[in-house]
Image (tube, rainbow, N blue to C red):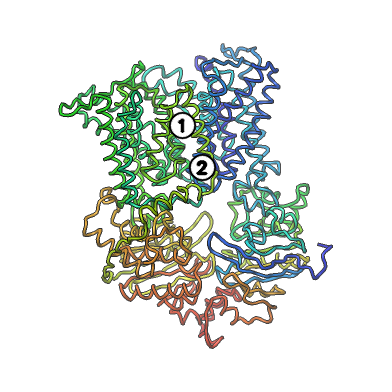
Amino acid sequence: MSTTTATTPVLGINGLTARYGAATVLRGVDLQVKPGEVVALLGPNGAGKTTLMRTAAGLVPASAGTVTLAGVDVTRRSPHRRARAGLCLVPEGRGIFPSLTVRENLRLQGAPRQRKETLDRIVEAFPVLGERLGAPAARLSGGQQQMIALGRSLVTNPDVVMLDEVSMGLAPLVIDQIFEALERLARTGTALLVVEQYVSRALAMADSVYVLSRGQVSWHGTPSEITEEEIMRRYLAVELPGGGEVA
Amino acid sequence: MTEYLPFIVAGLVTGAVYGLAGVGLVLTYKTSGVFNFAHGALATVAAYAFFVLNVEHEVSWPIAAAGAILVAGPVMGLILELITRRIATAGLAYQVSATVGLLLVVEAGTDLLFDPTVIRVVPAFLTEESFTLLDTSIAWADVIVFAFAIVVTAALALFFRVSRTGLQMRAVVDNPELLSLFGGSPAFTRRLAWVLGSVLVAASGVLLAPLLPLDPLQLTLLVVAAFGAAAIGSFSSLPLTLFGGLLIGVLASLSTKWFLTGVLSGVPVSLPFIVLFAVLLVFPKRRLAGKAFSVARSRPTWSAPASAQLVGGALVIAFLATVPSFAGVRLTAWTVAVASVLVFLSLSLLVRTSGQVSLAHVSFTAMGAAAFSHLAVDQEMPWLVALFLAGLIAVPIGAVLAIPAIRLTGLYLALATFGFGILLQSMFYSQDYMFGATGLGLPEPRPGWSWVDVQSDEGYYYLVLGFVAIATGLVIWLNKSRLGRLMRGLADSPMAVATSGAEVNVTRVMVFCLSAFLAAVGGALAAVAQTTVNGDSYQPLTSLVFFVLVMVVLGGEPWNAVIASALFFLVPAYMETGDITTWTQVGFGVAGVVIALLPAAAREVPRPIRELVDRVSRRGRRTKAAPVAGQRPLVEAGTLEVRDLNVRFGGVHAVDGVSLSAPTGSITGLIGPNGAGKTTTFNACSGINRPSSGTVCLDGHNVSRRGPAYRARRGIGRTFQKMELFESLTVRENVALGAEAARSGFNPLSHVFSNPVRSRRAAADTQHAIELCALSELAERPVSALSTGQRRLVELARCLAGDFRILLLDEPSSGLDHAETEFFGTILKNVVAERGLGILLVEHDMSLVLDVCAYIYVLDFGKPIYDGSPEQVTASPIVRAAYLGDAEVETAIELEVTA
């Protein structure tokens, strides 16, 4: 957003706590995404990464703490109002409407009066979609479905895009294409918050890294500061006295 | 041909109206997930609104129609959206209760506002001119109605394809959450859908108004034909729904020509329900089941202590014994009320205890009453035999009604029973083997016993009281038996019942049969109190009132049945006003809506009463001695072998050539990144999904084509990542079901009875598992009150209590903290050492996996990529690559191979 200065985080998460029923999933998480920055969010399964993104997007109510978009507190806003304010979540699984056709899926993504531009931009990024516009989205391969889901981040000019395991269940070649698209997106100045099981890929494009363990930030720094052994230890929760001596 | 033309034309016109109403129904159901049983009632409101404006206030018909359709329609739509938004997560039974409650309110409310003895006719308002085609005179009005329906449906179909709002409406059906991430408001979209849907049904109400004198029940039921139309459209396709409406209209119209007499003379009226029922019985499952709206079920867990129940029961019976001394002319009403306790009890068993739905319970009482009369009078059978057989006759019908419950989700069961009730009335009530065509009624004789006076009203009252007291005692006993636990397990989690080894379908059929039997006996007893009965006493609408009553009256069995029966039969008997039953119907309907809107906690018996009862009966002061835990022998050695397993969902190859082996006496790990296919492999092992190829063998015995219950009985137990506990049962009851579900198996008798030696063993095994998992302190607490960590332990204990040899544990540590996870690991190691169980563990907590597993399989992208000892796995570059994704897994495999 042009009015924000470089120091105001485009997405600010402050002391965020969230519960599912009786279980507390997030306990006071602080996380900042600055304009144009790529942030990798790592952590083992069940650490709360998905919940963090869903709470930021407004799908899970925050029981304490705030979420700000470009300095504006949106903690009480509904998900669709956050989306319109420039926050884009590409959720885990396939973020598509399976019974709608590809064209209809894409049409829902763009602004109401820019049908053609929307379509052109997504098809330019993922030409394979152009050939399947009339097909129901459910019939597409997993990779093509993920391309549709990512399309939204390409055409709505969001300030920050949160990506939850976009490579899950995809073939390596498709993952390459997806990551290329993400890198292009990052180059346009869109800030990204990435949850990704392929840690190295996430680190390769990240400016900043957060590690989440049992609902709390357990490490924060730059990719160069974290070693593979450190991640392995935290990620697989393997507690080894000798640090790197896994074998 | 020409002889059929008039019928076809008439059918097309009414069919178009049905179709229009059906389109509105599908629209609201699809977008909100709540099926509106009051849909027909909206047509009633619109038709009366049109009558008031056009006839009473002499407003010109276009303005009156606009008022009824474009003002009353949207207002009703907005009200419904408000209600359905709040009940979307309330559970199916409460959703049905709310919309059925609305139907009752509208139906009875209309009768209160408009004196039902006055005949109201809406004059035909469209042009009365006609033209001739193939010697048949066709009214222009009919053409207009037909064209209107076609044009409206076509416009809607276009709207859903072309406009952004239409796309959003379809999107909200697929995934409302995602729509909000797209910047669309799901709430606004749903509101719009309700407005549109209500406008459509209001239009059908106005179009139907001139066809027959206004009658709220008639109108409501006419529009229920829309249910059949919606069924043909699989409750999702708008054009097919319109087509379904046309088809039903034409067939119903033609059948008035074909079937004039006999049982088939009921066909024209019943056709929508025959269609509805047929669709639910024979349509391919995947076309209907589609999206099961899974909702967290929250059911009361408190029940009064046994001592309080006994004292309460004795007091109630003592009071009822004094009734003849003051009842006077109302003794018959009292007798009917006492007899009908059985009917409500049977419905409560089905609805509250077992989590099923029946909107046709009056049909069973009608069958009981009619069958009893024929057996006792025509066949001259002894009184008790006739009563018993009358109950038995309803049993197979109950079993037939269980078929939709087995095939489909709860909503379709509700629809099928609703249709069945109306079908039975319109086709069979007037048959000679039911109530006969004359309307004179059937004689319902009392027993001619010489040794006791049961001929008098008073004598018969005491007979019924004794009968009902004994039957109620039996039901209470049944509730506490294994079947009771299975029934409540069925309501809470059919999946967990099946994977524990009981055949859920056997339980379902048993519950329906039992319920039908009790209702029929209750119906016969009540009929005898009245000496003669006819079909008018068994209106299908009353089934809806019964259902709502069972939902709204608080308290457990049999208290809710006693209160419900008193409310339904005694309140009208003691109120002198003429339209009291109409008023009570409004009251029950409102209660049905309100109970669904209340938070779950408010559906419990109020806290002060609970505390008072607990205090008076000194709950908790005496603790029952826990059974002694038995030692459990080593299990027979065996191996779970998976060979070249492939599972495909649509185009997704979720599991691709997985082979693994999990022997008894050790813990085998199955790990891999998210989406690697671990849970899918598990589900294929326990029989929840079917592999596309490959085999699952236990001890060399191929079980790949068997269901989960069979596999459980062979020795495969499992837990679930998303826990499947019996929420309304205590810890001990949960664990006990693990120990005894497999023993009930297929045999209905062993659902109820078990020999004492075996039940002692089940109790000892239960206690053993409880102690092993350190749950003794919590054993009598309901599981819904426990923390995640404790709940995980309960699920494990349920698995340990059973006679399983191989346990499949799916992510058992998720939601546990570090200490809990460690404790969990210790238990696993203990049971393997002590009993020689085999465990296959899917787990993301690597410290647990490395700590307990003897051998580990690693999956990625559904493919096996590595297997070995924990040391080998942690050292393997392949595994590291799979988790970190820094090099292609293939490269790592090559590296390892060359090294």
Relative to A14, is B834 on the left or the right?
A: left
Which residue is at 40% across, 45% downward?
B406
Circle number at residue B595: 2
Relative to B883, is B366 on the left or the right?
A: left
Name above or below for residue B746 compared with residue A171: above
Instruction: Check contact, mark 1 vs mark 2: CB within 8 A.
Output: no
Relative image position of residue A92 (x, y in whole percent): 60, 61
| Amino acid on which the number 1 mark rests in the picture | Val
Query: Is residue A7 visible in the rendered structure shown here?
Result: yes
Relative to B153, is B658 on the left or the right?
A: left
- Within 10 Å of disc 1 (Cα), the crowding (few <14, some 14-19, many 20+) is many
- Within 10 Å of disc 2 (Cα), the crowding (few <14, some 14-19, many 20+) is many
Going by the picture, which residue comes out furthest to the right?
Answer: A3
Q: Based on the displayed image, in which of its 4 quarters is residue A46 positioned?
A: bottom right
Dot 1 or dot 2, earlier in sequence: 1
Q: Based on the displayed image, in which of its 4 quarters is residue B570 positioned?
A: top left
Relative image position of residue B517 (x, y in whole percent): 31, 37
Which subunit holds the residue at mark 2? B
Residues at marks 1 and 2, CA–CA distance in whole angstroms = 32 Å
Secondary structure of residue under mark 1: helix
Name above or below for residue B798 compared with residue B222: below
Circle number at residue B489: none
Relative image position of residue A153 (x, y in whole percent): 71, 59
Residue at numbered disc 1: B275
Name above or below for residue B788 compared with residue B585: below
Question: Is B832 in front, or is B856?
Answer: B832
Which residue is at 30% across, 26% downward?
B529
Secondary structure of residue under mark 2: helix
Which subunit holds the residue at mark 1? B
Question: Is B623 in front, or is B761?
Answer: B623
| Amino acid on which the number 2 mark rests in the picture | Ile
